Amino acid sequence: CALNQKLSFNKRNTRFISFATPSIFFDSLKRKKKMANREMAVYCFDTLVSHYNNDETPPPAFDDANHPLFVTWKKIVNGGEPRLRGCIGTLEARRLISGFKDYALTSALRDRRFPPIQSKELPFLQCTVSVLTDYETADDYLDWEVGKHGIIIEFTEPVSNTKRSATYLPEVPAHEGWTKIEAIDSLVRKAGYSGEITESVRRRIRLTRYQSTLFSMHYSEYLSYVKATRGGVAPAINGTSKPAMAFS
């Protein structure tokens, strides 16, 4: 896909939409860096709960700013390994409040890889919010660190001249145990290139690196937050035969 167009991109644990030329907002991201925090995750849960109840979302308890962002939902059952239920975000700077409200629902309900999250799944959900920062144009496709940087690649196919682009969040290459070249080659495939990946193809890549901060919260922690800050009232969920989770 070309830059400045919306894309839908599948990778091992993330989809993204809304890709914009990074240089447009490098300077603004450097001036005002925002860290992912608990209140952002709370707001995502608030948004999802309010959706099920057809209610107004409680006002957020964090300051607004402009940043790219992602919202990830995972489901944990019986202490097992978390399973992805949705992950969508934007590489273009958005106002955080409206962005988290939009992507909390988009990732929960409209990630085409999964059926929409149902209200009965709430007690098993974990929400992770990601705020992307420190966008930099790399010198070459190896000018980044595994575990530290997320990467965006842009390149033109050698024969068809088709433009391709894709991203991995910082945690993906480290989680997969990839070397830099393995991560790059995987990302080239995810971008839709099916030809032979040669050194010549790799050298066509324009790479942008970035960093991110994360905050993860389980639904039980969300309920504890509500209990401590809102008078101990557990959110009742429409469409369920009993409360989503009772306080002890």
Image (cartoon, grey):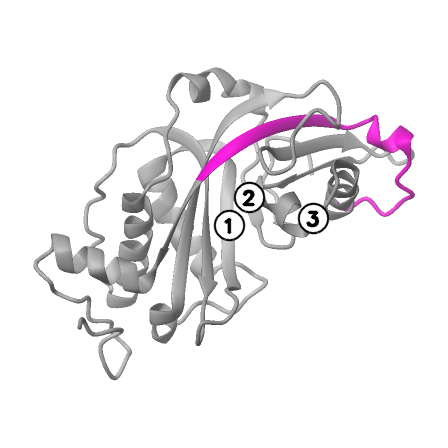
Disc number for residue 107: none
Q: Residue 200, percent across and down?
A: 90, 29
Q: Are marks 3 and 2 in contact (CB under 8 Å)?
A: no
Q: Which residues are magenta?
A: 192-213
Give the residue drawn at x 47%, y 53%: 72
Q: Quadrant of the N terminus?
A: top right
Q: Position of residue 94 (x, y in %)?
A: 41, 33
Three-letter code for the amino acid on which mark 3 is drawn: Gly
Residue annotated with mark 2 = 17
Q: CA distance from mark 1 to mark 3?
A: 23 Å
Residue beneath the point at 23% across and 81% down: 242
Residue highlighted by disc 1: 88
Q: Is residue 90 visible?
A: yes
Q: Nearer the viewer, mark 3 or mark 2?
A: 3
Is disc 2 in contact with disc 1, using a CB cutoff of under 8 Å?
yes
Q: Which mark is residue 177?
A: 3
Q: Nearer the viewer, residue 1 or 38?
A: 38
10 Å crowding of disc 1: few (<14), some (14-19), many (20+): many
Secondary structure type for disc 1: strand
Q: Amino acid at mark 1?
A: Ile
**In which quadrant of the rendered image does the C terminus lie?**
bottom left
Q: Is residue 10 visible?
A: no
Q: Earlier in the sequence, mark 2 or mark 1?
A: 2
Please name which of the two marks, 2 or 1, marks the residue nearer to the observer: 1
